[in-house]
Image (cartoon, rainbow, N blue to C red):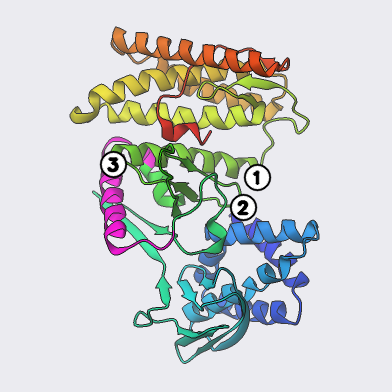
Amino acid sequence: MAQNSKRLLLLRHLVEAARLGEGRSAEDVLVRADRNDRRVVAELISDPLVGAWTAQTVRRLVGRQASVDSDLRQLGALAAASAIRTGQDARLQAWAIGGGVTLPTLGTALVGADGPVVIDVSDGVASIAGPARTVRVAADDRHWMPLRRLSAQHDDLAVTVNLEDCSPYRNSYHAPPVGRLGPDELQWWRQLFADAWSLLVRLLRRRAAEMSAGLRTLIPLALADGDMARSGTARDMFGALALTRPTSAPDLAITLVHEFQHSKLSGLLELVRLTRPDSAELHFAPWRVDPRPTAGLLQGVYAFLGIADAWHGLRAAPELALQATREFAIARRQVDAGLAALEGSRELTTEGREFVAGLRGAAERLLAEPVPDEDEDASRRALEICRRAWEERSRVSGNPTVAQAVSSPETASRRTAAA
């Protein structure tokens, strides 16, 4: 609800800023669509890529950047999607970016070049006339790329998410997005997602229930030769996460938990300020060797609390018990150390201190769980390795403002890039 309210305000700003009348025409179509089927418009507004577009375009407007016109004209594409889904006739103008026009929740038309397009919706048939070709919104047009989805169900809990590989607004991460997935790669994602969902429902049902309600989109990222696996969330895309190709169902399950933690906290931070805006402290985050501000450490602690809880749940799977126990021991030590730094910070607001206290309570419950001595020893060794690496980096950089904290290291390369 809060995210949709924010996006409606941003849309209003974009409509008022649109030139040549496209904004008003698009608004009229959206208003009619809302009257016909409010659920459809709410789903469109809540699409994470619509969130990215609205926020990025408003920032460009405020910054008076010259490239904003093509972004403003995406209003026509949004309105066209609403017209198609609610059975309206409409004629709208939009703009092709990267040779394509994306209709949110529907797919992308490859019109061959950037520039103005006209979208006609009549009697249930839609076509997009672009600079190089006209594309019909139909499965038999090879230039129409329908939005793919991943669906899974285990027991009584189901989930469906978009697999976004075309939208021009998916490029908000520390690695480039992949292009259109081939049939074999798509099938691989679908199978792995189903396997990961089964793990989540069986062993982490509460986490799965959260994702069933709030996870909307996965964005595959490209993995360069020799590069580490990566994943991430973007603050403007609540309900979306991006990731390179997971190696296994447990890897995907942990990544989903990790990044959805970030997404949830980012949503909360739209409503409540947990750290002071003039923050200057820097801390050792237990999963990195570079100093982190208080707000960044808070994000990391919340994410790794989810990771620790997830590995704890996965211990119940016999085939994962050894790995999960070792990872659980390390992750909970990371959380404990990160929390110690947060508890000593002077930059938490009153609400922030209450939030951290709640995290401490959850962490203590995990810390009370018994693990074998060899796993405890491994977590201490990992802590010491990372602490030494952090101290060496701090010494070389000569940074005098780093707040000292005893913390532990990252053990899975995918996690390094996120928190």
> Which residue: 47% across, 28% down?
304
- The answer to the question of whether label 2 and label 1 lie on touching residues, with beta carbons closer than 8 A, is yes
Residue 198: within the magenta?
Answer: yes
Label 1 Cα neighbours within 10 Å, binned few <14 / some 14-19 / many ≥20: few
248 to the left or right of 283: left
Q: Amino acid at mark 2?
A: Ala
Relative depth, front residue between 115 and 170: 115
Label 2 Cα neighbours within 10 Å, binned few <14 / some 14-19 / many ≥20: few
Q: Which residue is mark 2?
A: 2
Q: Which residue is mark 3?
A: 249
Q: Position of residue 114 (x, y in %)?
A: 60, 74
N-terminal-most mark, 2 or 1: 2
In the image, which disc is placed on residue 108? none
Q: Amino acid at mark 1?
A: Glu
Q: Magenta part of the protein: which range?
A: 179-207
Q: Position of residue 213 (x, y in %)?
A: 43, 51
52 to the left or right of 122: right
The residue at the far left in this view is: 318
Q: Which residue is mark 1?
A: 270
279 to the left or right of 178: right
The residue at the far front in this view is: 225
